Image (tube, grey):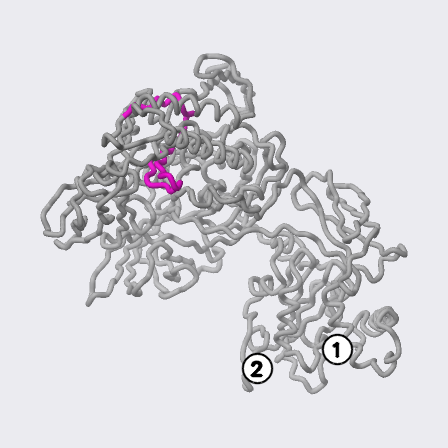
Amino acid sequence: MKTKAVHIITSIFICVLLNVFNISLSFSQESSKQNLNQIITKLNTQNDSLSIEKLYLQTDKPSYLAGDTLWFKSYLLNASFLTYSDKSGILYVELSNDSSRLIQRIMVPVYSGLASGYVALDQDLMPGGYTLTGYTNWMRNFGESYLFKKHFYVGADAGSEWLVNYNTQLIKDNDRDKIEMGLKINDFDKAPVGLREMQLSVTDGKKTWFKDKVETNLEGLLKLNFDLPEKTSAKNISLGIQDLRKSQGSRKFLIPIVLNRPEKIDLQFMPEGGKLVSGQPTNIAFKALNEDGYGANVSGKIYNSKQQEITSFATAHAGIGTFSLLPENAEIYTARIPLPGGKYQTYQLPSVESTGITLNVTNQFKSDSCRITLTPTADIVTADKTYYLIGMARNLICWGALAKFSKGQLQFVLSKQNFPSGIVRLILMNENKTALNERMFYNDRGDNLNIQLESDKTDYQQRDSISLNVKVSDYAGKPVQGSFSLAVTDNGQVKIDSNDAYSIVSHMLLTSDLKGNIESPGYYDNAATHPQKWQHLNHLLLAQGWAGYDWTEAFKPAKPLTYTNEEEFLIKGKVTNAFNKPVAKSAITLFSKKPLLVLESMTNESGDFIFKGISPIDTPSFFISAKNKRGKSFNVGIEMEEFKPPVFSAANNRIIPWFVNIDTNTYQTVNNRVALKKDQLRVTGGNLLKEVVINAKKIIKGSKNLNGPGGADVIIDEEQLRKAGKATLGDLLSKNVKGFGTKFSKTGQIYYSVHTMSVHLIIDGVNTDFFISEETSAYQYLKDIFDYYDAEEIKGIEVMVSGKYQMRYTSSFLDPLAVPWDHAFIEVTTRGGKGPFLKKVLVPIYINQCLSSLQKNFIAQSIQQVVPLICQIYVQLFIGHQT
């Protein structure tokens, strides 16, 4: 119904514009009009069927401390009508660091487009930049730009941070870049951190190319000199500072190094409408970016191929600006900006086309209409062909017209009442439906909600309750019913920059429809009431308003989408036998302690089963059992249909920690936070004590560790595994066991090791070395197991590398002549607790290896008879530590 209403409106607008263009309706023009209606109908119908979603997450604060709780409320809307989306019922929220490493993922149910939840930030979370990403499975069909992302900083306890001031100087030495850094380090109370031994390192992502031990002087000053390797991107350079005093917990943190070399400025030019056409005056937008990804203030001049100055240019806001140019045919234009030392950096403008059409939009401040100018070259006027000009807002065509250039340039006034508030995109197409020009402009109809808060008192005492009256009305003053978010913070402790802050208005109507990073999106929130901001908003859309709508794909038959919409939380899987054949009509039972429930189901003819009506909660635990047609759980396996999480790109802008080159206002804000914490302790009669670290032995329940509970050098317990999610066993060992990796033996064979010790893997008390065949290398055998198991299937990992823990394993599993200190043992306790061959996929491997040694006894028996007997032998021989 929505689509039908839009079609009626656009048809009316077409007739109005036809009169403006003074086009007589011949038969061919009637045919063109029908084609235009078909374009509108097809694209709007296609958009309606896609039901693209937009998501906004409102958080309670702009930044956090390790150990805080990040609270959020989400609004999932239909992108076209900005009404609550009914497409998806499951929302995924992820927290990742600036290296794109996933820290935490949660699943939240969505009801009528609304969802809320929290992300608990671990106390030991490393200070740095983090990204909160929200998405539905359906949103993944339309690219990463459709997802909601929020970049913020997570810090440590404010009162314990050092204050670091630094400056960098770039020195050219024989065409090589050298960096000189000066640092001053103070305690939070501004006392110098003097005569302190530290380790400094300079890294480029994961690569460290400078490391040195230094000592501060009495004033806490340091100087650092190092060479900058060639072709190094300054976007990822960081300075690591580690306090080498063990008594202070070896404090360690990373500071982004901002170089912003003038010769590395990225300067791009975008002609209005997309083209520079010979003889047609054109507005050209440009955007200059520093190496840190933020806008650079530049100024320069434009020259032609004869090195004659044509015009000048300068940025207006956030590295963006515009200038006008009358291009000449076959001319090549370059921009030149001055550099320190009297040099210049040169950039080339887009090439000039000899034929084409320019599209110009004049969108005046506080005007209810805009002026559209279409200017063709002479050959296009002579050809007298029909073109289609359409206006889109929120992926829907709201307006359309036929354009003929038989009389040359076309000018007309377009009413902005034809479009909703937000970005409007004009596209000019030829008869082959090929897009020739695109131009975006912003439409503000002044229809934002008016929200008023009224408190019951003007002054409050500590621990007073506060009553707030919230009144919401529309632009006409009529009351509005809806769902809203409210977060209460102390202005003296939570610093909010209105320019940097995201709002649901700026996200839904502006930034979500633009590509690339929008610097300080909150700056444009009230552009409709500030002439200068309105001009800057127009510059932004000229520079970054390149939606890149693929019209050739739009008119092709629709392809099936990769990702389905999830209306509710489902648990799905398949039951198969030992031969990977589906088991039909198998009884399936699902058990759960959190949430508490017991559900039963039955597989279909394909062996598939599904459980519905389960509310997703934080860290749920489900256990599923299956039975064959005879009601036995033996000889059946379960393959779960699991959610395959996507991998998203890292944030392209880095956040400078608050304690680096801190200003007075920021220091006062943080100091207020520290003072309040001390005051709360004083009021409650508490004393602020130093942190007490309790080193208790970790115990793995159900472990068959030969050394007894806690008898290992490294223990990864269930709590750590829960946080690791789907990390593989190999990843867990690489991250938590120092020295774990691979080495080459003297004979050139690769093997797993901890430092120089060969690795032996014990699973539930069973030595996996026993099952390595002569045809398989020990490395490949272990690699398969390390890749096969993940953290969700393991209860605990214990690593024995020292003599006091190795001996029991060496005597039990190795040849008596083996050298104990040449071997490391890894004991893995699985949730099944039945050894390394509990999983169905590994069962055929085990069967084949056992058959090779038992074939004389079972040569005449069928495989159905062999499998039960093999399992009995396995239980008799390998339960516990018998060999």
Dot 1 amino acid type: Ser
Q: Which mark, residue 812?
A: 1
> Residue drawn at (62%, 55%), measured in percent from left and top?
726
> Residue drawn at (23%, 30%), measured in percent from left and top?
407
**Which sits in the foreground, 799 or 621?**
621
Other residues around mark 1 within 10 Å, as few (<14) / some (14–19) / many (≥20): some
Q: Is residue 355 left or right of residue 239?
A: left
For the stretch drawn in magenta, what is the main secondary structure? strand
Q: Is residue 839 above or below residue 782?
A: above
Quadrant holding the N terminus: top right
Would you say residue 121 is visible in this rendering?
A: yes
Separation of residues labelled 1 and 2 (CA atoms): 26 Å
Query: Residue 403: percent from the left, percent from the top?
Result: 32, 31
Disc 1 versus disc 2: nearer the observer: 2
Give the SS element for disc 1.
helix
Q: Which mark, residue 318?
A: none
Q: Earlier in the sequence, mark 1 or mark 2?
A: 2
Q: Quadrant of residue 827?
A: bottom right
Name the residue that disc number 2 marks: 749
Dot 2 amino acid type: Gln
Other residues around mark 2 within 10 Å, as few (<14) / some (14–19) / many (≥20): few
Q: Is residue 445 left or right of residue 644?
A: left
| Residue 424 lies in the magenta stretch | yes
Circle 1/circle 2 CB separation < 8 Å: no
Q: Is residue 870 above or below residue 829?
A: below
> Which span of residues is magenta-colored?
412-439
Would you say residue 509 is visible in this rendering?
A: no
Q: Is residue 382 above or below residue 881?
A: above
**Which sits in the foreground, 650 or 829?**
650
